Amino acid sequence: VGTNAEFEPFEYLQNGEIVGFDVDLMEEIAKSMGKEIEWKNIAFDGLLPALQAKKLDVIIAGMTATEERKKTVAFTQPYYTASQVIIVKEGDNSIKSFDDLKGKRVGVMLGFTGDTVVSEIEGVKVERFNAAYAGIMALKADKVDAVVLDSEPAKNYAKQNPELKLINTDVAKEEYAIAVGKNDKELVEDIDKVLIELKANGTYDKLLEKYFN
Ligand code: ARG
């Protein structure tokens, strides 16, 4: 199972170990299927190519099930609804919506859906970073005016950095799902079955409570 452990609270490193909501969820799924997981932590934009090259069987990485990605891999049913939010400096009142990003330097992460959302807005100077952490550093150093990132990791960065604030908008909703090989229909069905079980028996809610408050 591949992931990119730079996406708290879904997957991140704690004392060198990969932990997070996705990790617990996938472990529960594996347990129920009688399988043991071998975790691989790689760059986010390397995940889909690795799955296609059969170097991975499964990806769980807060990955949005986009139409574009569905052309090359198969997704399970969604397990989380997220959105793209804008992070700016506390004192900045010039950005209140995605439209306001016109003419601004905006940090996004390579291969993230935020990259796609921002790149579609005309007149934005898009700056691409390898990890969310790097984008946040650039924002703090005034090298970019804003960062666009998934809601939950963004909340974490805002909590850890009081000089930053979040602009929530209602657009850019997206759904995270587990990815498997395009022809692995059986695996999708098996995982979907377990997901339904975990939602019905309270396990899923317990994990939500553990990682989101
Ligand atoms: N939801 C976004 C996407 O699918 C970002 C996911 C980033 N995940 C990660 N583990 N780094 O592109």
Image (cartoon, rainbow, N blue to C red):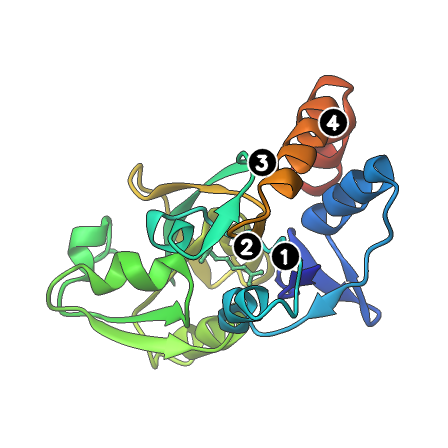
The residue carrying pointer 1 sits among few (fewer than 14), some (14 to 19) or many (20 or more) residues within 10 Å by Cα, namely: many
Residue 45 appears in the rendering: yes
State the CA–CA distance, disc 3 to disc 4.
Answer: 11 Å
Nearer the observer: mark 1 or 4; the answer is: 4
Q: Earlier in the sequence, mark 2 or mark 1?
A: 1
Disc 1 secondary structure class = loop
Q: Earlier in the sequence, mark 3 or mark 4?
A: 3
Disc 3 secondary structure class = loop
Give the residue displayed 28% in from the left and 56% down from the top: 117
State the CA–CA distance, disc 1 to disc 3.
Answer: 16 Å
Q: Report x, y in % for residue 26.
A: 74, 46
What residue is disc 3 on?
79
Q: In which quadrant will I find the N terminus?
A: bottom right
- The reply, left or right, for residue 60 in relation to residue 136 is right
Give the residue displayed 26% in from the left and 73% down from the top: 126
Is 60 or 71 nearer to us in this picture?
71
The residue carrying pointer 4 sits among few (fewer than 14), some (14 to 19) or many (20 or more) residues within 10 Å by Cα, namely: some
Give the residue displayed 54% in from the left and 49% down from the top: 183
What residue is disc 4 on?
198
Nearer the observer: mark 1 or 3; the answer is: 3
Q: Quick check: marks 2 and 1 in contact, CB under 8 Å?
A: yes
Amino acid at the residue labelled 2: Pro
* Marker disc for residue 8: 1
Q: Report x, y in % for residue 75.
A: 52, 44
Q: Earlier in the sequence, mark 1 or mark 4?
A: 1
